[in-house]
Amino acid sequence: MSAQISPGRKNPGGRRPGESGTRDAILDAALRLFSEHGYDGASVRAIAAGAGVDPALIRHFFGDKDGLFAAVVTDRTAVTQRLSQAVSADPDELGRAVTDAYLRLWEAPDTGPILLALVRSVTASETAASMLRAVMISRISTAPWVEAERSRHVALAAAHLFGVAAARHVLKVAPITEFTHDELVDQIAPTIQRYLDGTHR
Amino acid sequence: MSAQISPGRKNPGGRRPGESGTRDAILDAALRLFSEHGYDGASVRAIAAGAGVDPALIRHFFGDKDGLFAAVVTDRTAVTQRLSQAVSADPDELGRAVTDAYLRLWEAPDTGPILLALVRSVTASETAASMLRAVMISRISTAPWVEAERSRHVALAAAHLFGVAAARHVLKVAPITEFTHDELVDQIAPTIQRYLDGTHR
DNA sequence: CAGCAAACTCTACAAGCGGGGAACTCCGCA
DNA sequence: TGCGGAGTTCCCCGCTTGTAGAGTTTGCTG
Protein backbone atom coordinates (compact mmCIF):
# COMPACT_ATOMS: atom_id res chain seq x y z
CA MET A 1 0.00 0.00 0.00
CA SER A 2 3.01 2.28 0.39
CA ALA A 3 1.19 3.73 3.36
CA GLN A 4 1.41 7.49 3.77
CA ILE A 5 0.47 7.96 7.33
CA SER A 6 0.71 11.74 7.24
CA PRO A 7 -0.58 12.76 3.85
CA GLY A 8 -0.60 16.46 4.77
CA ARG A 9 3.20 16.65 5.08
CA LYS A 10 4.71 18.79 2.35
CA ASN A 11 8.40 18.11 2.87
CA PRO A 12 9.71 14.64 3.39
CA GLY A 13 10.85 15.03 7.00
CA GLY A 14 13.53 12.93 8.55
CA ARG A 15 17.26 13.17 8.55
CA ARG A 16 19.06 14.68 5.56
CA PRO A 17 21.89 12.86 3.83
CA GLY A 18 25.45 14.04 4.28
CA GLU A 19 26.92 16.77 6.46
CA SER A 20 24.13 19.11 7.33
CA GLY A 21 25.86 22.05 8.95
CA THR A 22 22.48 22.94 10.36
CA ARG A 23 23.78 23.68 13.81
CA ASP A 24 26.24 26.20 12.46
CA ALA A 25 23.61 27.75 10.23
CA ILE A 26 21.44 28.31 13.26
CA LEU A 27 24.33 29.82 15.19
CA ASP A 28 25.11 32.15 12.30
CA ALA A 29 21.55 33.33 11.92
CA ALA A 30 21.20 33.71 15.68
CA LEU A 31 24.34 35.79 15.94
CA ARG A 32 23.18 38.05 13.18
CA LEU A 33 19.66 38.51 14.51
CA PHE A 34 20.65 38.86 18.14
CA SER A 35 23.19 41.51 17.21
CA GLU A 36 20.69 43.38 15.07
CA HIS A 37 17.60 43.19 17.26
CA GLY A 38 18.69 42.04 20.70
CA TYR A 39 17.49 39.04 22.65
CA ASP A 40 13.82 39.93 22.76
CA GLY A 41 13.66 41.31 19.26
CA ALA A 42 15.05 38.18 17.65
CA SER A 43 12.39 35.49 17.75
CA VAL A 44 13.16 31.82 17.64
CA ARG A 45 11.05 31.56 14.52
CA ALA A 46 12.89 34.37 12.78
CA ILE A 47 16.22 32.79 13.60
CA ALA A 48 15.04 29.45 12.28
CA ALA A 49 13.78 31.11 9.11
CA GLY A 50 17.10 32.90 8.74
CA ALA A 51 18.85 29.56 8.92
CA GLY A 52 16.35 27.98 6.56
CA VAL A 53 15.36 25.47 9.19
CA ASP A 54 12.42 24.35 11.27
CA PRO A 55 12.09 26.15 14.63
CA ALA A 56 11.92 22.84 16.42
CA LEU A 57 15.53 22.19 15.53
CA ILE A 58 16.57 25.05 17.74
CA ARG A 59 14.89 23.32 20.59
CA HIS A 60 16.50 20.09 19.53
CA PHE A 61 20.04 21.46 19.50
CA PHE A 62 19.96 24.11 22.21
CA GLY A 63 17.08 23.28 24.51
CA ASP A 64 15.56 26.73 24.66
CA LYS A 65 16.17 30.30 23.62
CA ASP A 66 18.48 30.99 26.54
CA GLY A 67 20.54 27.99 25.61
CA LEU A 68 20.86 29.29 22.10
CA PHE A 69 21.93 32.71 23.30
CA ALA A 70 24.50 31.21 25.62
CA ALA A 71 25.79 28.99 22.83
CA VAL A 72 26.14 31.96 20.51
CA VAL A 73 28.09 33.93 23.05
CA THR A 74 30.33 31.20 24.39
CA ASP A 75 30.83 28.94 21.40
CA ARG A 76 32.34 31.45 19.14
CA THR A 77 34.26 34.00 21.02
CA ALA A 78 37.77 34.81 21.85
CA VAL A 79 36.81 38.17 23.23
CA THR A 80 38.57 37.94 26.51
CA GLN A 81 41.83 36.45 25.38
CA ARG A 82 42.38 39.19 22.81
CA LEU A 83 42.26 41.81 25.51
CA SER A 84 44.65 39.80 27.65
CA GLN A 85 47.25 39.99 24.92
CA ALA A 86 47.00 43.75 24.78
CA VAL A 87 47.66 44.30 28.44
CA SER A 88 51.04 42.66 28.24
CA ALA A 89 52.33 45.48 26.06
CA ASP A 90 55.09 47.93 26.97
CA PRO A 91 53.74 50.08 29.83
CA ASP A 92 54.48 53.29 27.96
CA GLU A 93 52.42 52.10 25.02
CA LEU A 94 49.73 50.47 27.11
CA GLY A 95 47.11 53.11 26.41
CA ARG A 96 47.58 52.75 22.72
CA ALA A 97 47.69 48.96 22.81
CA VAL A 98 44.56 48.64 24.91
CA THR A 99 42.67 51.20 22.87
CA ASP A 100 43.61 49.53 19.65
CA ALA A 101 42.70 46.07 20.91
CA TYR A 102 39.41 47.21 22.39
CA LEU A 103 38.23 48.99 19.29
CA ARG A 104 39.34 46.10 17.11
CA LEU A 105 37.15 43.83 19.19
CA TRP A 106 34.14 45.79 17.98
CA GLU A 107 35.25 45.77 14.38
CA ALA A 108 36.32 42.17 13.95
CA PRO A 109 33.66 40.03 12.27
CA ASP A 110 33.93 37.27 14.84
CA THR A 111 33.71 39.36 18.00
CA GLY A 112 31.96 42.60 16.97
CA PRO A 113 28.50 41.11 16.45
CA ILE A 114 28.70 39.35 19.77
CA LEU A 115 29.38 42.57 21.62
CA LEU A 116 26.55 44.18 19.72
CA ALA A 117 24.27 41.32 20.70
CA LEU A 118 25.26 41.67 24.33
CA VAL A 119 24.64 45.41 24.34
CA ARG A 120 21.29 45.07 22.63
CA SER A 121 20.22 42.37 25.07
CA VAL A 122 21.23 44.11 28.25
CA THR A 123 17.65 45.00 29.02
CA ALA A 124 16.19 41.58 28.52
CA SER A 125 18.69 39.33 30.14
CA GLU A 126 20.68 39.75 33.31
CA THR A 127 23.05 37.18 31.88
CA ALA A 128 23.84 39.53 29.03
CA ALA A 129 24.33 42.43 31.42
CA SER A 130 26.78 40.60 33.61
CA MET A 131 28.68 39.18 30.66
CA LEU A 132 29.02 42.64 29.28
CA ARG A 133 30.22 43.93 32.61
CA ALA A 134 32.75 41.16 32.64
CA VAL A 135 34.05 41.89 29.19
CA MET A 136 34.03 45.58 29.71
CA ILE A 137 35.58 45.93 33.05
CA SER A 138 36.61 42.90 34.98
CA ARG A 139 38.78 41.43 32.29
CA ILE A 140 40.73 44.62 32.17
CA SER A 141 40.73 45.67 35.75
CA THR A 142 41.64 42.29 37.16
CA ALA A 143 44.67 42.03 34.91
CA PRO A 144 47.82 41.37 36.92
CA TRP A 145 49.32 44.79 36.47
CA VAL A 146 46.42 46.49 38.16
CA GLU A 147 46.90 47.21 41.82
CA ALA A 148 43.71 47.52 43.80
CA GLU A 149 44.37 51.22 44.20
CA ARG A 150 44.17 51.81 40.48
CA SER A 151 41.13 49.77 39.59
CA ARG A 152 38.94 52.84 39.68
CA HIS A 153 41.07 54.59 37.13
CA VAL A 154 41.00 51.52 34.94
CA ALA A 155 37.24 51.45 35.17
CA LEU A 156 37.11 55.04 33.98
CA ALA A 157 39.27 54.15 31.01
CA ALA A 158 37.02 51.21 30.23
CA ALA A 159 33.94 53.40 30.48
CA HIS A 160 35.48 55.83 28.05
CA LEU A 161 36.29 53.08 25.58
CA PHE A 162 32.83 51.65 25.93
CA GLY A 163 31.27 55.04 25.29
CA VAL A 164 33.27 55.53 22.14
CA ALA A 165 32.48 52.03 20.89
CA ALA A 166 28.79 52.46 21.62
CA ALA A 167 28.68 55.81 19.88
CA ARG A 168 30.41 54.29 16.87
CA HIS A 169 28.64 50.96 16.53
CA VAL A 170 25.33 51.19 18.30
CA LEU A 171 24.21 54.79 18.17
CA LYS A 172 26.18 55.48 15.00
CA VAL A 173 26.88 59.06 15.90
CA ALA A 174 28.07 60.90 12.85
CA PRO A 175 31.39 62.43 13.87
CA ILE A 176 32.52 59.25 15.57
CA THR A 177 31.67 56.91 12.73
CA GLU A 178 33.61 59.09 10.31
CA PHE A 179 36.95 58.47 11.98
CA THR A 180 39.07 55.67 10.60
CA HIS A 181 40.18 53.13 13.14
CA ASP A 182 43.67 54.60 13.30
CA GLU A 183 42.46 58.16 13.63
CA LEU A 184 40.22 57.14 16.48
CA VAL A 185 43.07 55.40 18.26
CA ASP A 186 45.22 58.49 17.81
CA GLN A 187 42.52 60.65 19.30
CA ILE A 188 41.78 58.71 22.44
CA ALA A 189 44.85 56.63 23.23
CA PRO A 190 46.61 59.47 25.06
CA THR A 191 43.62 59.92 27.33
CA ILE A 192 43.46 56.20 28.04
CA GLN A 193 47.15 56.25 28.84
CA ARG A 194 46.59 59.08 31.32
CA TYR A 195 43.80 57.18 33.05
CA LEU A 196 45.99 54.09 33.28
CA ASP A 197 48.89 56.12 34.66
CA GLY A 198 46.66 57.98 37.06
CA THR A 199 47.77 61.32 35.58
CA HIS A 200 44.40 62.26 34.23
CA ARG A 201 43.65 65.02 36.70
CA MET B 1 -37.26 46.56 35.09
CA SER B 2 -34.03 48.45 35.96
CA ALA B 3 -32.57 46.79 32.89
CA GLN B 4 -29.01 45.57 33.28
CA ILE B 5 -27.89 45.10 29.75
CA SER B 6 -24.47 43.76 30.65
CA PRO B 7 -24.99 41.58 33.68
CA GLY B 8 -21.48 40.14 33.44
CA ARG B 9 -19.74 43.44 34.18
CA LYS B 10 -17.96 43.38 37.51
CA ASN B 11 -17.00 47.02 37.85
CA PRO B 12 -19.52 49.72 37.16
CA GLY B 13 -17.89 51.24 34.08
CA GLY B 14 -18.42 54.80 33.08
CA ARG B 15 -16.82 58.01 34.16
CA ARG B 16 -15.61 58.50 37.70
CA PRO B 17 -16.61 61.55 39.70
CA GLY B 18 -14.09 64.30 40.32
CA GLU B 19 -10.56 64.84 39.06
CA SER B 20 -9.19 61.51 37.99
CA GLY B 21 -5.51 62.13 37.35
CA THR B 22 -5.58 58.99 35.29
CA ARG B 23 -3.56 60.44 32.45
CA ASP B 24 -0.74 61.33 34.79
CA ALA B 25 -0.90 57.96 36.47
CA ILE B 26 -0.43 56.32 33.09
CA LEU B 27 2.47 58.60 32.27
CA ASP B 28 4.11 57.78 35.61
CA ALA B 29 3.73 54.05 35.19
CA ALA B 30 4.89 54.23 31.60
CA LEU B 31 8.00 56.19 32.51
CA ARG B 32 8.87 53.69 35.19
CA LEU B 33 8.31 50.62 33.05
CA PHE B 34 9.91 52.00 29.92
CA SER B 35 12.99 52.93 31.91
CA GLU B 36 13.17 49.55 33.56
CA HIS B 37 12.38 47.29 30.63
CA GLY B 38 12.64 49.35 27.46
CA TYR B 39 10.00 49.90 24.82
CA ASP B 40 9.47 46.27 23.87
CA GLY B 41 9.73 44.94 27.39
CA ALA B 42 7.06 47.22 28.78
CA SER B 43 3.70 46.05 27.52
CA VAL B 44 0.68 48.27 27.27
CA ARG B 45 -1.11 45.92 29.60
CA ALA B 46 1.63 46.06 32.19
CA ILE B 47 1.68 49.83 32.08
CA ALA B 48 -2.08 49.95 32.50
CA ALA B 49 -1.86 47.56 35.42
CA GLY B 50 0.89 49.68 36.94
CA ALA B 51 -1.38 52.68 36.74
CA GLY B 52 -4.34 50.71 38.09
CA VAL B 53 -6.28 51.37 34.96
CA ASP B 54 -7.86 49.62 31.99
CA PRO B 55 -5.52 49.18 28.99
CA ALA B 56 -8.08 50.74 26.70
CA LEU B 57 -7.51 54.06 28.42
CA ILE B 58 -4.02 54.18 27.02
CA ARG B 59 -5.45 53.92 23.57
CA HIS B 60 -8.00 56.55 24.47
CA PHE B 61 -5.47 59.09 25.69
CA PHE B 62 -2.47 58.40 23.52
CA GLY B 63 -3.71 56.60 20.42
CA ASP B 64 -1.19 53.82 20.42
CA LYS B 65 1.96 52.63 22.15
CA ASP B 66 4.20 54.89 20.11
CA GLY B 67 2.06 57.84 21.05
CA LEU B 68 2.44 56.95 24.69
CA PHE B 69 6.20 56.66 24.38
CA ALA B 70 6.40 59.98 22.61
CA ALA B 71 4.22 61.57 25.26
CA VAL B 72 6.41 60.20 28.02
CA VAL B 73 9.55 61.55 26.44
CA THR B 74 8.29 64.93 25.33
CA ASP B 75 5.71 65.79 27.95
CA ARG B 76 7.98 65.66 30.88
CA THR B 77 11.41 66.64 29.96
CA ALA B 78 13.68 69.56 30.17
CA VAL B 79 16.68 67.51 29.13
CA THR B 80 17.94 69.71 26.40
CA GLN B 81 17.53 73.05 28.09
CA ARG B 82 19.55 71.95 31.10
CA LEU B 83 22.53 71.20 28.92
CA SER B 84 22.15 74.52 27.16
CA GLN B 85 22.63 76.31 30.44
CA ALA B 86 25.86 74.49 31.12
CA VAL B 87 27.50 75.42 27.87
CA SER B 88 27.26 79.09 28.64
CA ALA B 89 29.70 78.72 31.50
CA ASP B 90 33.14 80.31 31.73
CA PRO B 91 35.28 78.68 29.00
CA ASP B 92 37.95 77.68 31.50
CA GLU B 93 35.41 75.84 33.58
CA LEU B 94 33.47 74.49 30.65
CA GLY B 95 34.67 70.92 31.08
CA ARG B 96 33.59 70.89 34.66
CA ALA B 97 30.27 72.60 33.99
CA VAL B 98 29.33 70.28 31.17
CA THR B 99 30.42 67.18 33.06
CA ASP B 100 28.46 68.20 36.09
CA ALA B 101 25.35 69.04 34.10
CA TYR B 102 25.51 65.88 32.04
CA LEU B 103 25.88 63.57 35.00
CA ARG B 104 23.15 65.41 36.89
CA LEU B 105 20.82 64.76 33.98
CA TRP B 106 21.15 61.05 34.71
CA GLU B 107 20.64 61.46 38.41
CA ALA B 108 17.71 63.85 38.51
CA PRO B 109 14.39 62.09 39.08
CA ASP B 110 12.66 63.94 36.27
CA THR B 111 15.24 63.38 33.54
CA GLY B 112 17.21 60.29 34.58
CA PRO B 113 14.45 57.74 33.96
CA ILE B 114 13.79 59.22 30.54
CA LEU B 115 17.39 58.79 29.48
CA LEU B 116 17.29 55.26 30.82
CA ALA B 117 14.12 54.61 28.84
CA LEU B 118 15.72 55.96 25.69
CA VAL B 119 18.82 53.83 26.13
CA ARG B 120 16.82 50.72 26.80
CA SER B 121 14.62 51.33 23.79
CA VAL B 122 17.37 52.01 21.31
CA THR B 123 16.99 48.59 19.75
CA ALA B 124 13.26 48.68 19.32
CA SER B 125 12.58 52.15 18.12
CA GLU B 126 14.51 54.25 15.66
CA THR B 127 12.78 57.20 17.25
CA ALA B 128 14.47 56.41 20.53
CA ALA B 129 17.82 56.01 18.84
CA SER B 130 17.69 59.32 17.09
CA MET B 131 16.41 61.11 20.15
CA LEU B 132 19.27 59.70 22.12
CA ARG B 133 21.72 60.75 19.46
CA ALA B 134 20.22 64.19 19.62
CA VAL B 135 20.49 64.46 23.37
CA MET B 136 23.91 62.95 23.47
CA ILE B 137 25.67 64.70 20.70
CA SER B 138 23.82 67.23 18.65
CA ARG B 139 22.65 69.30 21.55
CA ILE B 140 26.20 69.71 22.65
CA SER B 141 28.03 69.84 19.41
CA THR B 142 25.69 72.30 17.75
CA ALA B 143 26.02 74.70 20.61
CA PRO B 144 27.06 78.14 19.42
CA TRP B 145 30.59 77.99 20.74
CA VAL B 146 31.47 74.98 18.66
CA GLU B 147 33.19 75.71 15.40
CA ALA B 148 32.76 73.07 12.76
CA GLU B 149 36.42 72.19 13.09
CA ARG B 150 35.98 71.12 16.69
CA SER B 151 32.80 69.14 16.47
CA ARG B 152 34.74 65.91 16.34
CA HIS B 153 36.46 66.66 19.60
CA VAL B 154 33.15 67.54 21.16
CA ALA B 155 31.73 64.24 19.98
CA LEU B 156 34.59 62.42 21.69
CA ALA B 157 33.85 64.24 24.92
CA ALA B 158 30.18 63.35 24.61
CA ALA B 159 31.03 59.71 23.94
CA HIS B 160 33.17 59.67 27.06
CA LEU B 161 30.40 61.15 29.16
CA PHE B 162 27.91 58.72 27.72
CA GLY B 163 30.18 55.80 28.49
CA VAL B 164 30.58 56.85 32.09
CA ALA B 165 26.85 57.42 32.51
CA ALA B 166 26.02 54.07 30.95
CA ALA B 167 28.54 52.27 33.14
CA ARG B 168 27.07 53.97 36.18
CA HIS B 169 23.34 53.74 35.53
CA VAL B 170 22.76 50.98 33.03
CA LEU B 171 25.53 48.44 33.47
CA LYS B 172 26.08 49.38 37.10
CA VAL B 173 29.77 48.65 36.99
CA ALA B 174 31.08 48.45 40.50
CA PRO B 175 33.95 50.94 40.63
CA ILE B 176 31.95 53.56 38.76
CA THR B 177 28.85 53.31 40.88
CA GLU B 178 30.91 53.74 44.02
CA PHE B 179 32.01 57.25 43.20
CA THR B 180 29.96 60.09 44.57
CA HIS B 181 28.76 62.56 42.01
CA ASP B 182 31.42 65.08 42.97
CA GLU B 183 34.23 62.55 42.93
CA LEU B 184 33.21 61.46 39.47
CA VAL B 185 33.15 65.02 38.21
CA ASP B 186 36.61 65.57 39.71
CA GLN B 187 37.90 62.49 37.94
CA ILE B 188 36.69 63.16 34.45
CA ALA B 189 36.16 66.91 34.13
CA PRO B 190 39.83 67.58 33.30
CA THR B 191 39.67 65.11 30.45
CA ILE B 192 36.48 66.64 29.12
CA GLN B 193 38.10 70.04 29.30
CA ARG B 194 41.04 68.75 27.25
CA TYR B 195 38.73 67.35 24.59
CA LEU B 196 36.84 70.62 24.42
CA ASP B 197 40.08 72.59 24.17
CA GLY B 198 41.54 70.23 21.63
CA THR B 199 44.56 69.59 23.86
CA HIS B 200 43.82 65.94 24.44
CA ARG B 201 46.62 64.53 22.32
C1' DC C 1 21.51 -6.48 8.69
C1' DA C 2 19.14 -4.94 12.99
C1' DG C 3 18.41 -1.43 15.91
C1' DC C 4 19.10 2.83 18.03
C1' DA C 5 20.28 7.73 18.20
C1' DA C 6 20.38 11.84 15.79
C1' DA C 7 18.38 14.93 12.50
C1' DC C 8 14.38 16.55 10.70
C1' DT C 9 9.15 18.01 9.74
C1' DC C 10 4.56 19.01 11.00
C1' DT C 11 1.01 20.38 14.12
C1' DA C 12 -0.60 22.38 18.23
C1' DC C 13 -1.12 24.81 22.47
C1' DA C 14 -1.40 28.29 25.95
C1' DA C 15 -0.10 32.69 26.79
C1' DG C 16 0.75 37.30 25.71
C1' DC C 17 0.73 41.01 22.51
C1' DG C 18 -1.35 45.57 20.34
C1' DG C 19 -5.41 47.23 18.84
C1' DG C 20 -10.48 48.03 18.23
C1' DG C 21 -15.33 48.55 19.43
C1' DA C 22 -19.65 48.61 22.12
C1' DA C 23 -21.67 50.07 26.22
C1' DC C 24 -22.11 52.85 30.11
C1' DT C 25 -21.63 56.99 33.27
C1' DC C 26 -20.54 61.31 34.45
C1' DC C 27 -19.37 66.35 33.57
C1' DG C 28 -19.96 70.85 31.44
C1' DC C 29 -22.52 73.68 28.70
C1' DA C 30 -26.43 75.41 25.97
C1' DT D 1 -33.29 70.25 31.17
C1' DG D 2 -31.24 68.12 27.50
C1' DC D 3 -27.26 66.71 25.06
C1' DG D 4 -22.62 65.85 23.39
C1' DG D 5 -18.26 64.47 24.60
C1' DA D 6 -14.83 62.74 27.77
C1' DG D 7 -13.66 58.99 30.88
C1' DT D 8 -14.17 54.33 31.85
C1' DT D 9 -15.24 49.26 31.69
C1' DC D 10 -15.45 44.81 29.36
C1' DC D 11 -15.09 41.72 25.48
C1' DC D 12 -12.99 40.31 21.39
C1' DC D 13 -9.93 39.68 17.30
C1' DG D 14 -5.92 38.33 14.81
C1' DC D 15 -1.29 37.68 15.39
C1' DT D 16 3.15 36.20 17.31
C1' DT D 17 5.63 34.14 20.82
C1' DG D 18 8.22 30.14 23.13
C1' DT D 19 7.67 25.56 23.79
C1' DA D 20 6.04 20.81 23.32
C1' DG D 21 5.32 16.34 21.22
C1' DA D 22 4.58 12.86 17.83
C1' DG D 23 6.04 10.99 13.65
C1' DT D 24 9.60 10.11 9.81
C1' DT D 25 13.98 9.39 7.73
C1' DT D 26 18.86 8.79 7.85
C1' DG D 27 23.59 7.39 9.53
C1' DC D 28 26.30 4.64 12.53
C1' DT D 29 27.57 0.86 15.20
C1' DG D 30 27.69 -3.81 16.63
Image (cartoon, coloured by chain):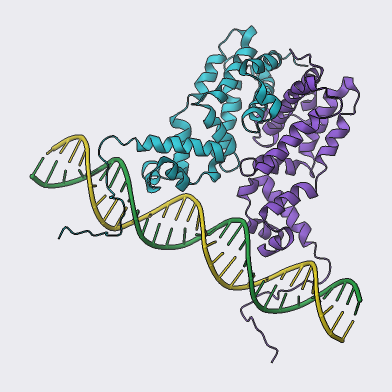
Chain colours: A purple, B cyan, C yellow, D green
Q: In the figure, A89 relative to A76: above or below?
A: above
> Count the marks: how many?
0
Answer with the quarter of the image where residue A150 lies. Answer: top right
At 71% across and 37% down in the image, what residue appears?
A132
Q: In the figure, B186 relative to B54: above or below?
A: above
At 68% across and 74% down in the image, what residue appears?
A11
Q: Nearer the viewer, residue D21 or A60?
A: D21
Answer with the quarter of the image where residue B23 lies. Answer: top left
At 82% across and 32% down in the image, what residue appears?
A101
The image shows residue B33 at horizontal and vertical percentages of 51, 39
The image shows residue A178 at horizontal and vertical percentages of 71, 30
Q: In the figure, A129 relative to B169: above or below?
A: below
At 71% across and 35% down in the image, what residue appears?
A133
**Horizontal side, residue A43 vs residue D27: left or right:** left
The image shows residue A102 at horizontal and vertical percentages of 79, 32
The image shows residue A156 at horizontal and vertical percentages of 72, 23
- Is residue A187 visible from the viewing direction of this image? no
Q: Quadrant of the N terminus of chain B?
A: bottom left
**Horizontal side, residue A87 vs residue B184: left or right:** right
Q: Nearer the viewer, residue B35 or D29?
A: D29
**Horizontal side, residue A66 vs residue C13: left or right:** right
- Is residue B78 visible from the viewing direction of this image? yes
What is the residue that sits farthest to the bottom in this orientation? A1
